[in-house]
Amino acid sequence: MERFWNKVNRAAKGCWLWTATSNRLGYGQFKYRGRMMRAHIVAFELSNGPVPAGLELDHLCGNRACVNPAHLEPVSHAENCRRAKAKRTTCRNGHPYTAETLIINNKGARCCRICRNKYSRERQWKEHPHHRPLRGAINPNAKLTEAQVVEIRRGTMTGVEAAKHFGVCKNMISLIRTGQAWGHLLGVSSKSQGRRSSF
């Protein structure tokens, strides 16, 4: 089928790139046997015959614009999805998969540890609101009031002087002034600060 292959840029080695119309997913499109089809499927059928029933074509090269029949393999939908996920280097939120962040669940799927932990915390806070950390002066462990915290931030005393004056350690003065403690007064989310922000 000369009309089809005229739209293909055949490299001596590697991918054969489709040069005509493509869909929004990056797959080539070609009208074949009276209907619009993906170009790589047409290329496979012209070279090898119909795709076996119940199977779909996987791009072994990972290039959706490639129509090289040698780069196409009939596989099940589940296997195609598994291979596609295995090729990804980041989760859907952009966190890179590393030895620290990658988790394989009991179904064999890859998960992001960062996203899973965030989801778990948010779900726990929604289901058990009474478990949320008490922020500011309402926390029974707080040694300062909100007015004192504002004074520490705006004051001119050194860390040692402020610690002695307010009866807390110098480290707490530093945490307050940098927003790592009592961050909710600055609009800083307590989720990013840890337990110390509650005091």
Image (cartoon, rainbow, N blue to C red):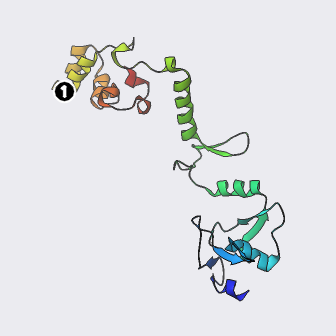
- The spot of residue 99 in percent (x, y) is 59, 46
Question: What is the quadrant of residue 185 in the picture?
Answer: top left
- The spot of residue 63 in percent (x, y) is 62, 69
Using the image, determine if residue 36 lies above or below residue 127.
below
Tell me the quadrant of the picture where the C terminus can be found.
Answer: top left
Nearer-the-camera pick, 178 or 34: 34
Nearer-the-camera pick, 98 or 51: 51
* Residue type, label 1: Arg
Using the image, determine if residue 164 lies above or below residue 8.
above
Residue 155 located left or right of residue 6: left
What residue is drawn where x is 35% and y is 32%?
188
What residue is drawn where x is 62% and y is 77%?
18
- The spot of residue 6 in percent (x, y) is 65, 87
Can residue 75 be seen here? yes
Residue 172 located left or right of residue 69: left
Residue 22 located left or right of residue 39: left
